[in-house]
Image: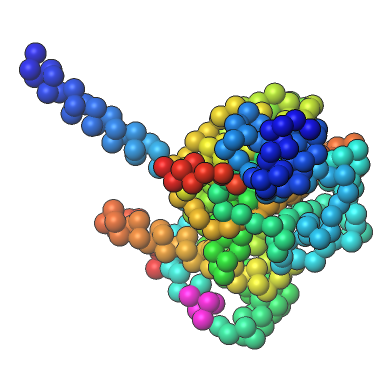
Protein backbone atom coordinates (compact mmCIF):
# COMPACT_ATOMS: atom_id res chain seq x y z
CA UNK A 1 0.00 0.00 0.00
CA UNK A 2 1.55 3.29 -1.00
CA UNK A 3 1.51 6.47 1.04
CA UNK A 4 -1.19 8.09 -1.05
CA UNK A 5 -3.57 5.17 -0.65
CA UNK A 6 -2.89 4.95 3.05
CA UNK A 7 -3.55 8.66 3.38
CA UNK A 8 -6.89 8.27 1.60
CA UNK A 9 -7.92 5.40 3.83
CA UNK A 10 -6.98 7.20 6.99
CA UNK A 11 -8.82 10.34 6.08
CA UNK A 12 -11.83 8.49 4.81
CA UNK A 13 -11.62 10.40 1.55
CA UNK A 14 -11.78 7.30 -0.54
CA UNK A 15 -15.36 6.59 0.41
CA UNK A 16 -14.83 2.89 0.18
CA UNK A 17 -12.78 0.21 1.85
CA UNK A 18 -11.89 -1.00 -1.61
CA UNK A 19 -9.29 1.72 -1.78
CA UNK A 20 -7.47 0.10 1.12
CA UNK A 21 -6.94 -3.05 -0.93
CA UNK A 22 -3.99 -2.92 -3.29
CA UNK A 23 -4.88 -4.11 -6.77
CA UNK A 24 -8.57 -3.47 -6.44
CA UNK A 25 -7.83 0.11 -5.49
CA UNK A 26 -6.01 0.86 -8.72
CA UNK A 27 -8.73 -0.70 -10.85
CA UNK A 28 -11.62 1.03 -9.17
CA UNK A 29 -10.08 4.36 -8.24
CA UNK A 30 -11.53 6.09 -11.24
CA UNK A 31 -13.52 5.51 -14.38
CA UNK A 32 -11.37 4.23 -17.23
CA UNK A 33 -9.31 7.09 -18.62
CA UNK A 34 -10.54 9.62 -16.04
CA UNK A 35 -8.65 11.39 -13.30
CA UNK A 36 -8.85 9.56 -9.92
CA UNK A 37 -8.83 12.88 -8.09
CA UNK A 38 -12.24 13.77 -9.49
CA UNK A 39 -14.18 10.72 -8.33
CA UNK A 40 -15.23 8.74 -5.29
CA UNK A 41 -16.32 5.15 -5.79
CA UNK A 42 -19.90 4.53 -4.68
CA UNK A 43 -20.67 1.14 -6.20
CA UNK A 44 -18.50 -1.74 -7.36
CA UNK A 45 -19.80 -5.11 -8.46
CA UNK A 46 -17.01 -7.36 -9.66
CA UNK A 47 -19.28 -10.40 -9.97
CA UNK A 48 -17.29 -12.81 -7.88
CA UNK A 49 -20.69 -13.90 -6.60
CA UNK A 50 -24.24 -12.86 -7.39
CA UNK A 51 -25.30 -10.71 -4.46
CA UNK A 52 -29.05 -11.06 -4.15
CA UNK A 53 -29.11 -8.21 -1.66
CA UNK A 54 -28.04 -5.90 -4.46
CA UNK A 55 -29.41 -7.43 -7.65
CA UNK A 56 -33.00 -8.23 -8.54
CA UNK A 57 -33.34 -10.72 -11.40
CA UNK A 58 -36.48 -9.20 -12.91
CA UNK A 59 -38.18 -5.86 -13.49
CA UNK A 60 -40.32 -4.46 -10.68
CA UNK A 61 -43.58 -5.23 -12.51
CA UNK A 62 -42.90 -8.83 -13.49
CA UNK A 63 -42.23 -12.14 -11.78
CA UNK A 64 -38.90 -13.82 -12.33
CA UNK A 65 -38.94 -16.43 -15.08
CA UNK A 66 -38.04 -19.69 -13.30
CA UNK A 67 -35.91 -20.85 -16.21
CA UNK A 68 -32.35 -19.99 -15.18
CA UNK A 69 -30.44 -18.43 -18.06
CA UNK A 70 -27.65 -16.83 -16.07
CA UNK A 71 -24.74 -17.57 -13.78
CA UNK A 72 -21.70 -15.96 -12.25
CA UNK A 73 -18.56 -17.61 -13.52
CA UNK A 74 -14.91 -16.56 -13.73
CA UNK A 75 -15.66 -13.15 -12.32
CA UNK A 76 -18.42 -12.30 -14.76
CA UNK A 77 -22.19 -12.31 -14.83
CA UNK A 78 -23.35 -14.27 -17.87
CA UNK A 79 -26.88 -14.00 -19.27
CA UNK A 80 -27.71 -16.00 -22.35
CA UNK A 81 -30.56 -16.48 -24.84
CA UNK A 82 -32.69 -19.46 -23.89
CA UNK A 83 -36.21 -20.78 -24.31
CA UNK A 84 -38.33 -21.21 -21.20
CA UNK A 85 -40.61 -24.13 -20.28
CA UNK A 86 -43.17 -22.87 -22.81
CA UNK A 87 -40.60 -22.81 -25.58
CA UNK A 88 -40.40 -19.02 -25.68
CA UNK A 89 -37.38 -16.75 -25.54
CA UNK A 90 -37.75 -14.51 -22.50
CA UNK A 91 -36.32 -11.28 -21.11
CA UNK A 92 -33.85 -11.35 -18.23
CA UNK A 93 -33.11 -8.23 -16.24
CA UNK A 94 -30.74 -7.60 -13.36
CA UNK A 95 -31.25 -4.28 -11.62
CA UNK A 96 -30.50 -2.52 -8.35
CA UNK A 97 -34.01 -1.11 -7.87
CA UNK A 98 -34.47 -0.60 -4.12
CA UNK A 99 -30.79 -1.27 -3.42
CA UNK A 100 -28.68 1.32 -5.18
CA UNK A 101 -29.46 4.46 -7.12
CA UNK A 102 -27.61 7.68 -7.78
CA UNK A 103 -27.98 11.08 -9.39
CA UNK A 104 -24.99 12.31 -11.42
CA UNK A 105 -21.55 10.77 -11.47
CA UNK A 106 -19.83 8.23 -13.67
CA UNK A 107 -21.23 4.80 -14.48
CA UNK A 108 -19.25 2.11 -16.27
CA UNK A 109 -19.39 -1.55 -17.22
CA UNK A 110 -17.02 -3.87 -19.00
CA UNK A 111 -18.88 -6.35 -21.14
CA UNK A 112 -18.88 -8.73 -24.07
CA UNK A 113 -22.05 -9.05 -26.12
CA UNK A 114 -23.99 -11.96 -27.64
CA UNK A 115 -24.63 -12.27 -31.35
CA UNK A 116 -27.39 -13.65 -33.58
CA UNK A 117 -30.96 -12.79 -34.36
CA UNK A 118 -33.07 -11.31 -31.57
CA UNK A 119 -30.84 -10.48 -28.57
CA UNK A 120 -31.05 -6.91 -27.27
CA UNK A 121 -28.32 -6.62 -24.61
CA UNK A 122 -28.18 -3.34 -22.73
CA UNK A 123 -26.77 -1.35 -19.84
CA UNK A 124 -29.07 1.44 -18.68
CA UNK A 125 -29.93 3.71 -15.79
CA UNK A 126 -33.60 3.93 -14.93
CA UNK A 127 -36.29 4.73 -12.44
CA UNK A 128 -40.06 4.49 -12.21
CA UNK A 129 -41.51 7.45 -10.34
CA UNK A 130 -45.26 7.36 -10.67
CA UNK A 131 -45.90 7.40 -14.39
CA UNK A 132 -42.52 8.96 -15.12
CA UNK A 133 -39.67 6.72 -16.26
CA UNK A 134 -36.43 8.61 -16.95
CA UNK A 135 -33.81 6.44 -18.64
CA UNK A 136 -30.23 6.65 -19.84
CA UNK A 137 -29.33 3.91 -22.29
CA UNK A 138 -25.55 3.80 -21.98
CA UNK A 139 -25.26 0.79 -24.29
CA UNK A 140 -27.79 -1.21 -26.26
CA UNK A 141 -26.95 -3.46 -29.18
CA UNK A 142 -29.00 -5.09 -31.90
CA UNK A 143 -26.91 -7.90 -33.39
CA UNK A 144 -29.88 -9.28 -35.30
CA UNK A 145 -30.22 -6.12 -37.33
CA UNK A 146 -27.84 -7.27 -40.06
CA UNK A 147 -25.48 -5.29 -42.28
CA UNK A 148 -28.21 -3.21 -43.93
CA UNK A 149 -29.21 -1.82 -40.55
CA UNK A 150 -25.65 -0.82 -39.65
CA UNK A 151 -25.91 -2.60 -36.29
CA UNK A 152 -24.09 -5.83 -37.21
CA UNK A 153 -22.15 -7.70 -39.84
CA UNK A 154 -23.30 -10.48 -42.16
CA UNK A 155 -22.75 -13.05 -39.40
CA UNK A 156 -24.97 -11.00 -37.07
CA UNK A 157 -22.11 -10.04 -34.80
CA UNK A 158 -22.68 -6.58 -33.28
CA UNK A 159 -20.50 -3.89 -34.89
CA UNK A 160 -22.26 -0.88 -33.42
CA UNK A 161 -24.24 0.09 -30.38
CA UNK A 162 -26.80 2.70 -29.50
CA UNK A 163 -26.87 5.42 -26.87
CA UNK A 164 -30.19 7.07 -26.06
CA UNK A 165 -31.34 9.42 -23.34
CA UNK A 166 -35.00 9.60 -22.35
CA UNK A 167 -36.43 12.33 -20.16
CA UNK A 168 -39.44 10.04 -19.93
CA UNK A 169 -40.52 6.77 -21.56
CA UNK A 170 -41.77 8.50 -24.72
CA UNK A 171 -39.69 11.67 -24.62
CA UNK A 172 -36.28 11.26 -26.22
CA UNK A 173 -33.60 13.82 -25.47
CA UNK A 174 -30.96 12.47 -27.85
CA UNK A 175 -29.59 9.38 -29.52
CA UNK A 176 -26.46 8.17 -31.26
CA UNK A 177 -25.19 5.10 -33.08
CA UNK A 178 -21.57 4.25 -32.31
CA UNK A 179 -19.63 2.19 -34.87
CA UNK A 180 -17.25 -0.32 -33.29
CA UNK A 181 -15.32 -3.51 -33.88
CA UNK A 182 -17.14 -6.80 -33.25
CA UNK A 183 -18.52 -6.35 -29.73
CA UNK A 184 -19.03 -10.09 -29.27
CA UNK A 185 -15.34 -10.82 -29.87
CA UNK A 186 -13.90 -9.10 -26.79
CA UNK A 187 -14.70 -7.15 -23.65
CA UNK A 188 -15.17 -3.40 -23.94
CA UNK A 189 -15.90 -0.58 -21.52
CA UNK A 190 -19.07 1.46 -21.81
CA UNK A 191 -19.47 4.52 -19.64
CA UNK A 192 -21.35 7.73 -19.06
CA UNK A 193 -20.39 10.86 -17.20
CA UNK A 194 -23.67 12.34 -16.02
CA UNK A 195 -23.46 15.99 -15.04
CA UNK A 196 -26.29 18.34 -14.16
CA UNK A 197 -26.51 19.86 -17.63
CA UNK A 198 -24.62 17.44 -19.83
CA UNK A 199 -23.98 13.77 -20.41
CA UNK A 200 -20.81 12.45 -22.00
CA UNK A 201 -20.58 8.87 -23.17
CA UNK A 202 -17.40 6.81 -23.47
CA UNK A 203 -16.36 3.65 -25.30
CA UNK A 204 -13.13 2.13 -23.98
CA UNK A 205 -12.33 5.48 -22.39
CA UNK A 206 -12.82 7.44 -25.59
CA UNK A 207 -15.49 10.13 -25.71
CA UNK A 208 -18.06 9.15 -28.35
CA UNK A 209 -21.15 11.27 -27.70
CA UNK A 210 -22.06 14.38 -25.73
CA UNK A 211 -25.58 15.56 -25.08
CA UNK A 212 -26.62 18.81 -23.41
CA UNK A 213 -29.45 17.58 -21.21
CA UNK A 214 -30.62 18.11 -17.65
CA UNK A 215 -31.95 15.15 -15.67
CA UNK A 216 -31.89 15.00 -11.90
CA UNK A 217 -33.77 11.94 -10.66
CA UNK A 218 -31.88 9.18 -8.86
CA UNK A 219 -31.56 6.29 -11.29
CA UNK A 220 -30.77 2.66 -10.57
CA UNK A 221 -28.53 0.33 -12.60
CA UNK A 222 -29.90 -2.15 -15.11
CA UNK A 223 -28.25 -4.96 -17.06
CA UNK A 224 -30.67 -6.65 -19.40
CA UNK A 225 -30.89 -9.22 -22.13
CA UNK A 226 -34.22 -8.67 -23.82
CA UNK A 227 -35.30 -9.62 -27.33
CA UNK A 228 -36.70 -7.77 -30.28
CA UNK A 229 -36.52 -4.11 -31.25
CA UNK A 230 -34.01 -3.64 -34.09
CA UNK A 231 -32.51 -7.06 -33.35
CA UNK A 232 -35.60 -8.81 -34.70
CA UNK A 233 -37.46 -11.83 -33.40
CA UNK A 234 -35.29 -14.67 -32.12
CA UNK A 235 -35.77 -17.96 -33.93
CA UNK A 236 -34.18 -21.35 -34.54
CA UNK A 237 -31.03 -19.66 -35.81
CA UNK A 238 -30.45 -17.75 -32.56
CA UNK A 239 -27.49 -19.26 -30.70
CA UNK A 240 -28.58 -20.21 -27.19
CA UNK A 241 -26.75 -21.18 -24.02
CA UNK A 242 -23.75 -19.90 -22.05
CA UNK A 243 -21.46 -19.87 -25.08
CA UNK A 244 -23.43 -16.91 -26.44
CA UNK A 245 -23.84 -14.95 -23.24
CA UNK A 246 -23.97 -11.27 -22.50
CA UNK A 247 -20.98 -11.21 -20.13
CA UNK A 248 -20.43 -8.40 -17.66
CA UNK A 249 -17.07 -8.25 -15.91
CA UNK A 250 -17.94 -5.39 -13.62
CA UNK A 251 -20.35 -2.56 -12.92
CA UNK A 252 -19.02 0.50 -11.14
CA UNK A 253 -20.31 3.92 -10.19
CA UNK A 254 -18.61 7.01 -8.85
CA UNK A 255 -19.76 10.31 -7.49
CA UNK A 256 -18.01 13.54 -8.37
CA UNK A 257 -15.65 14.54 -5.62
CA UNK A 258 -16.02 18.25 -6.22
CA UNK A 259 -19.30 20.11 -6.87
CA UNK A 260 -17.89 22.08 -9.77
CA UNK A 261 -17.61 18.92 -11.83
CA UNK A 262 -21.36 18.73 -12.10
CA UNK A 263 -22.37 22.37 -11.78
CA UNK A 264 -20.88 24.07 -14.84
CA UNK B 1 -15.74 45.13 -47.42
CA UNK B 2 -17.96 46.57 -44.71
CA UNK B 3 -20.86 44.65 -46.12
CA UNK B 4 -18.85 41.46 -45.99
CA UNK B 5 -17.85 42.10 -42.37
CA UNK B 6 -21.44 42.84 -41.39
CA UNK B 7 -22.50 39.68 -43.12
CA UNK B 8 -20.21 37.43 -41.11
CA UNK B 9 -22.07 37.72 -37.78
CA UNK B 10 -25.38 37.30 -39.58
CA UNK B 11 -24.11 34.17 -41.27
CA UNK B 12 -22.67 32.93 -37.99
CA UNK B 13 -26.02 33.51 -36.31
CA UNK B 14 -27.83 31.73 -39.10
CA UNK B 15 -25.44 28.79 -38.84
CA UNK B 16 -25.89 28.71 -35.07
CA UNK B 17 -29.65 28.62 -35.51
CA UNK B 18 -29.36 25.88 -38.10
CA UNK B 19 -27.13 23.97 -35.74
CA UNK B 20 -29.58 24.39 -32.88
CA UNK B 21 -32.40 23.12 -35.05
CA UNK B 22 -30.30 20.19 -36.20
CA UNK B 23 -29.66 19.15 -32.59
CA UNK B 24 -33.37 18.59 -31.96
CA UNK B 25 -33.72 14.84 -32.46
CA UNK B 26 -36.57 13.48 -34.54
CA UNK B 27 -39.30 12.01 -32.37
CA UNK B 28 -39.27 8.21 -32.85
CA UNK B 29 -42.96 8.19 -31.91
CA UNK B 30 -43.79 10.14 -35.07
CA UNK B 31 -44.43 6.79 -36.73
CA UNK B 32 -47.54 6.35 -34.60
CA UNK B 33 -50.67 7.77 -36.23
CA UNK B 34 -52.43 10.81 -34.78
CA UNK B 35 -55.76 9.83 -33.32
CA UNK B 36 -58.37 11.40 -31.07
CA UNK B 37 -57.12 10.63 -27.55
CA UNK B 38 -60.63 10.42 -26.07
CA UNK B 39 -60.55 6.61 -25.70
CA UNK B 40 -57.22 6.84 -23.85
CA UNK B 41 -58.57 9.54 -21.57
CA UNK B 42 -61.57 7.33 -20.80
CA UNK B 43 -59.21 4.46 -19.95
CA UNK B 44 -57.18 6.59 -17.56
CA UNK B 45 -60.38 7.70 -15.83
CA UNK B 46 -61.37 4.12 -14.92
CA UNK B 47 -60.79 3.01 -11.36
CA UNK B 48 -58.54 0.02 -10.76
CA UNK B 49 -61.37 -2.53 -10.73
CA UNK B 50 -62.92 -1.23 -13.95
CA UNK B 51 -59.53 -0.93 -15.62
CA UNK B 52 -58.52 -4.47 -14.71
CA UNK B 53 -61.86 -5.82 -15.92
CA UNK B 54 -61.44 -4.13 -19.28
CA UNK B 55 -57.84 -5.27 -19.70
CA UNK B 56 -58.74 -8.89 -18.94
CA UNK B 57 -62.06 -8.90 -20.77
CA UNK B 58 -62.35 -11.33 -23.67
CA UNK B 59 -58.74 -12.38 -23.21
CA UNK B 60 -57.60 -8.79 -23.56
CA UNK B 61 -59.07 -8.47 -27.04
CA UNK B 62 -61.13 -5.35 -26.32
CA UNK B 63 -58.18 -3.56 -24.75
CA UNK B 64 -55.89 -4.53 -27.62
CA UNK B 65 -58.43 -3.21 -30.13
CA UNK B 66 -58.56 0.15 -28.36
CA UNK B 67 -54.80 0.67 -28.14
CA UNK B 68 -54.25 -0.59 -31.70
CA UNK B 69 -55.72 2.68 -32.97
CA UNK B 70 -52.80 4.47 -31.31
CA UNK B 71 -50.07 1.86 -31.62
CA UNK B 72 -50.97 -0.33 -34.60
CA UNK B 73 -49.47 -3.83 -34.76
CA UNK B 74 -46.69 -3.91 -37.32
CA UNK B 75 -45.66 -0.29 -36.72
CA UNK B 76 -42.27 -0.25 -35.06
CA UNK B 77 -41.07 2.63 -32.88
CA UNK B 78 -37.30 2.94 -33.00
CA UNK B 79 -35.49 3.69 -30.88
CA UNK B 80 -37.89 2.82 -28.10
CA UNK B 81 -37.06 3.23 -24.44
CA UNK B 82 -36.89 0.13 -22.29
CA UNK B 83 -39.48 1.87 -20.14
CA UNK B 84 -41.95 1.99 -23.01
CA UNK B 85 -41.04 -1.34 -24.65
CA UNK B 86 -41.08 -3.22 -21.34
CA UNK B 87 -44.44 -1.85 -20.24
CA UNK B 88 -45.97 -2.55 -23.65
CA UNK B 89 -44.72 -6.13 -23.76
CA UNK B 90 -45.76 -6.91 -20.18
CA UNK B 91 -49.17 -5.38 -20.82
CA UNK B 92 -50.03 -6.92 -24.17
CA UNK B 93 -48.20 -10.19 -23.51
CA UNK B 94 -48.82 -10.92 -19.86
CA UNK B 95 -51.60 -8.42 -19.14
CA UNK B 96 -49.82 -7.01 -16.11
CA UNK B 97 -52.28 -4.35 -14.99
CA UNK B 98 -49.77 -1.80 -13.69
CA UNK B 99 -47.90 -1.89 -16.99
CA UNK B 100 -51.14 -1.44 -18.94
CA UNK B 101 -51.74 1.76 -16.97
CA UNK B 102 -48.23 2.92 -17.89
CA UNK B 103 -48.68 1.91 -21.54
CA UNK B 104 -51.97 3.84 -21.81
CA UNK B 105 -50.36 6.87 -20.17
CA UNK B 106 -47.45 6.67 -22.59
CA UNK B 107 -49.77 6.56 -25.60
CA UNK B 108 -51.75 9.47 -24.20
CA UNK B 109 -48.60 11.58 -23.82
CA UNK B 110 -47.66 10.78 -27.43
CA UNK B 111 -51.07 11.88 -28.67
CA UNK B 112 -51.05 15.03 -26.55
CA UNK B 113 -47.64 15.91 -27.97
CA UNK B 114 -48.94 15.37 -31.50
CA UNK B 115 -51.86 17.67 -30.77
CA UNK B 116 -49.59 20.32 -29.32
CA UNK B 117 -47.26 20.12 -32.30
CA UNK B 118 -50.17 20.32 -34.74
CA UNK B 119 -51.52 23.38 -32.91
CA UNK B 120 -48.09 24.99 -33.00
CA UNK B 121 -47.80 24.55 -36.75
CA UNK B 122 -51.45 25.54 -37.14
CA UNK B 123 -51.75 23.14 -40.02
CA UNK B 124 -55.24 21.56 -40.11
CA UNK B 125 -53.88 18.59 -42.06
CA UNK B 126 -51.70 17.69 -39.08
CA UNK B 127 -54.59 17.60 -36.65
CA UNK B 128 -55.57 14.22 -35.24
CA UNK B 129 -58.28 12.35 -37.10
CA UNK B 130 -61.74 12.79 -35.59
Please state if B10 lies on the left or on the right of A9 as rendered: left
Q: Nearer the viewer, residue B77 or B98?
A: B98
Q: Which residues are magenta?
A: B41-45
In this image, A77 relative to B61: left or right? right
Residue at 30%, 60% (x, y): give it.
B119
For the C terminus of chain B, the quadrant is: bottom left
Q: Does residue A60 lie above or below A121 as drawn? A: below
**Foreground of the two, A170 or A131:** A131
The reply to whether the magenta stretch includes residue B124 is: no
Name the residue rendered at 72%, 32% in the picture: A3
Display colour scheme: rainbow
Q: Quadrant of residue A162?
A: top right
Q: Could you say where residue A151 lies in the image, as x and y percent from the top left?
A: 65, 32
Q: In this view of the protein, can residue B118 be seen by the observer?
A: yes
Q: Is the magenta region chiefly helix, strand or loop? A: helix
Q: Tell me which residue sits at (56%, 44%) in the image.
A: A256
Amino acid sequence: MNTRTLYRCLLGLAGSLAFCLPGIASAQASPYGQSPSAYTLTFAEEFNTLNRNVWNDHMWYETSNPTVNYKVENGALKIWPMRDANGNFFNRTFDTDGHFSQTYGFFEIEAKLPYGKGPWPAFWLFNHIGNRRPEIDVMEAYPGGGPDSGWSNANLHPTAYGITVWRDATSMAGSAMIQTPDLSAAFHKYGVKWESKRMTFYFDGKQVYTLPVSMNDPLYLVLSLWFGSASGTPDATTPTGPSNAYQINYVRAWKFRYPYFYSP
Amino acid sequence: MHTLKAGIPIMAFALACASAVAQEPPDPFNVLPPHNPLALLQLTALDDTQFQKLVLENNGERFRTIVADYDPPGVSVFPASHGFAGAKEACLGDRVIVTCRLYVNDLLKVQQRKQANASATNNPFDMPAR
